[in-house]
């Protein structure tokens, strides 16, 4: 019984992960891209977060993204301009293009 439950949970989590990856890919391929201004970036050990703001179709948004600490992300500073791809279904969700397509 416990083994069957573990299999079911694993399958559900795999489906959710596949949906998230598909949504990110679709946004990077077909979502509108805009320049965003980095408001802040911070790291704790090897993980971090970048906060940014952008304007899409006259509407101003502030968003952020979880990031891993590496050479590319540590080069980002507040005030920098970065390109983000916007999720059409939820314009408050944006992905830093260079981090996914590098």
Image (tube, rainbow, N blue to C red):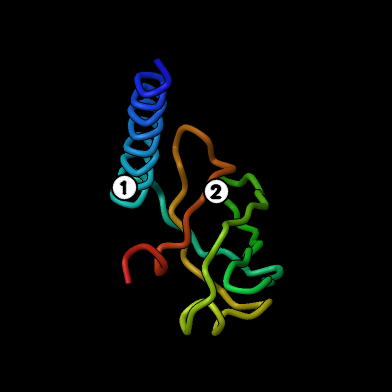
Residue 14 location (% of width, % of height): 34, 34
Cβ–Cβ under 8 Å for marks 2 and 1? no
Query: Which class describes the residues within 10 Å of circle 2: few (<14), some (14-19), or many (20+)?
Result: some
Residue 74 location (% of width, % of height): 56, 82
Dot 2 or dot 1, earlier in sequence? 1
Q: Quadrant of residue 33?
A: bottom left
Tell me the CA gap for discs 2 and 1: 20 Å
Residue at the outermost top position: 1
Q: Is residue 70 above or below residue 51?
A: below
Horizontally, is 2 left or right of 25 in the view? Answer: right
Q: Quadrant of the N terminus?
A: top left
Q: Is residue 32 above or below residue 40?
A: above
Q: Quadrant of residue 45?
A: bottom right
Going 70% across and 68% down the picture, which residue do you hit? 39
Q: Which mark is residue 91?
A: none
Going 68% across and 77% down the picture, which residue do you hit? 78
Going 41% across and 63% down the picture, which residue do you hit? 97
Q: Quadrant of the C terminus?
A: bottom left
Residue 46 location (% of width, % of height): 57, 72
SS state under label 2? strand
Going 51% across and 64% down the picture, which residue do you hit? 35
Nearer-the-camera pick, 45 or 5: 5
Q: Which residue is mark 2?
A: 56
Q: Which residue is mark 1?
A: 25
């Amino acid at each position: 019984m416990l083994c069957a439950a573990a299999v079911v949970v694993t399958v559900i989590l795999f489906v959710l992960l596949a949906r998230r990856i598909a949504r990110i890919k679709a946004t990077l391929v077909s979502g509108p891209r805009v320049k965003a201004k980095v408001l802040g970036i911070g790291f704790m050990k090897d993980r971090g977060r970048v906060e940014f703001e952008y304007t899409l179709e006259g509407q101003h948004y502030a968003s952020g993204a979880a990031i891993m600490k590496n050479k590319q992300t540590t080069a980002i500073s507040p005030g920098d301009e970065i390109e983000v791809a916007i999720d059409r279904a939820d314009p408050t969700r944006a992905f830093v293009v260079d981090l996914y397509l590098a």
